[in-house]
Structures are given as C-alpha cells and as structure tokens.
Amino acid sequence: MPIRIGLQPAAQPRLRVDWWNASKQAATSLIKSVQLTADRLVRTPFRWALRVAGDFRGRFSLRNRVRRRQFALLCAFDDRYEQLVALICCAAQSTGSTSRDGYYKELRKWMRDNYGSIRHYLQPAWANTQSQISRDPFESLLAFERLEEVLTAHSSIEDMMLCRNSLDKYRFGLEKDQKVR
C-alpha cells in the first residue's frame, strides 16, 4: 500500500505530456498550413481557370448567342406591342382617334416587318389555344389599315389577349431555358 503524503508528483511526466501535445499541435498546424498553401497554389488557380473557361464557353456558345438574340428580338417586339396596345386603349377612350393614325401606321409597319422573324417562335403558343379557329392573332390584329377599324372590329380584344398570352409563354420559355443552363 502506497503512502500518501500530499507531495506534488514529479514534474517530468507532466512535461513529457505537455511536450507531446505541443509537438502534436505543431505537426497538425504544419500539415494544415501546407495543405492550405497547396490549395492556394494549385487548386484555386485550377478552379479559377475552370470558372473562366466555363464563362467563356457559356458566353460564346452558339446556343446562348441564339437565346440572347431571341430574347432581344422578343423584348423589342414586346415593347412595340405594348405601345400598340396602349395606343389602341387610349384611342378607345377618346373620340378623336384620327390624330393617332400616323403613329398607328408607323407601329403597324414596324410590327409587320419584324413579325416574320419571331412568328415561328410564337406560333406554338397561339396555335394550341382553346379557340376553335386556329388563326394568327397578330396578323388579324395588324391587318387593319386604320386605327378606327381596329376599334370597331369584334375580335380585336380577343386578338390582343391571345397576342399577350403567346408573348408571355414565349418569354417564360426563354427565361426558363436560361435558368436551366
């Protein structure tokens, strides 16, 4: 049976444990710093190069260029369409629509000239509608020479709604496709 006298244990084993812990922490710290340095020197430039190459591929790929061009065409056409609808609504509210005929003819000419480039993208949206007559709402809306004829036509409001619906469907498809890529 050992005798207990309340003296401090020898300092040597305690120093040995502290030395072991200190050397273990130093080795771990050295390994971590070497790993971080390797990560900075090798992996980070590699990741950067992959990101730049990915951006380059995405920015200059033919598919993305086509999508951007389609989106630009859609935005330009949609802006002019909104101007046309605003003009029709304003003319419907006021009685003197003869002063707006020049602006209507200008908008109509621009839309008829540029509708051919966007028509085949919009066609699936208006061709699959619930209506029994499969007609092009843009062509029927732009068929009138004068603004007064648009206002008196029975199908103008329906055509405007179908046009807006097809433009929105096409825009949604483009935006959805952009988010996926």
Image: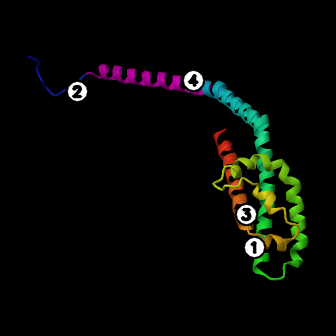
Q: Position of residue 180 (x, y in %)?
A: 64, 40
For the C terminus, which image quadrant? top right
Indicate which disc residue 8 carries.
2
The first of marks 2 and 3 along the sequence is 2
| First-in-chain label (1 vs 2) | 2
Which segment did they paint magenta?
Answer: 10-37
Provide the residue designation for mark 4.
Answer: 34
Which residue is more in the foreground, 61 or 26?
61
Q: Residue at x 76, y 64 (%)?
A: 82
SS at circle 4 = helix
- Where is residue 54? Give x, y as percent: 71, 33
Residue count near mark 1 (Cα–Cα under 10 Å), binned few <14, some 14–19, many ≥20? few
Disc 2 to disc 3, how far (Cα)? 96 Å
Q: How busy is the neighbourhood of tag 3: few (under 14 within 10 Å), some, or many (20 plus)?
A: some
**The stretch drawn in magenta includes residue 88:** no
Give the label, 3 or 4, closer to the camera: 3
Residue ID for mark 1: 89
Look at mark 3 in the image and give the residue it sits on.
Answer: 160
